[in-house]
Image: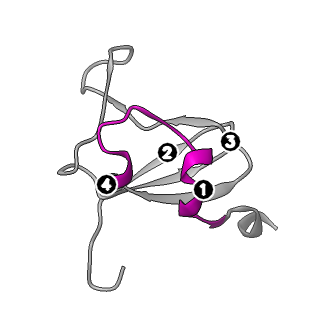
Amino acid sequence: MGDVVQRVQVKTCMTKREVTIGRRLPGTSKGALVPYGIDEVDAFFLLDGELSIFLIPISEVAGKLRISLAKHRRFRVGSAISLIR
């Protein structure tokens, strides 16, 4: 974005309700989820089951493992449908 480099974590979900934004520790595949810290990522780029695109700053979701997309509608920035037509 301009001259600023941001660390963006990409997540997808098949529904439009809830998305997991936590991560598993390295070396674990079924271990407990841990949240991303503000020193690890700047924003989340999310694509939901309806192909809506969200860009959510970490300050809005810091410390969370899962979020409701309905509560974050103001961060919807577009739709990926236009990319596949």
Three-letter code, disc 2: Lys
Q: Earlier in the sequence, mark 3 or mark 1?
A: 3
Based on the picture, tell me whether residue 66 belongs to the magenta stretch.
yes
Q: Which residues are magenta?
A: 60-78
Q: Secondary structure at mark 2?
A: strand
The residue that disc 2 covers is 11
Question: Around disc 1, counting alpha carbons within 10 Å, would you say few (fewer than 14), some (14 to 19), or many (20 or more)?
Answer: some
Based on the picture, tell me whether residue 11 belongs to the magenta stretch.
no
Q: Secondary structure at mark 4?
A: helix
Q: CA distance from mark 3 to mark 1?
A: 11 Å
Three-letter code, disc 1: Arg
Three-letter code, disc 4: Ser
Left or right of residue 66: residue 79: right
Three-letter code, disc 3: Lys
The residue that disc 3 covers is 16
Q: Earlier in the sequence, mark 3 or mark 4?
A: 3
x and y, in percent, of residue 52 in the image = 67, 56
Q: Does the CB distance between marks 3 and 1 fall below 8 Å?
A: no
Q: CA distance from mark 4 to mark 2?
A: 17 Å
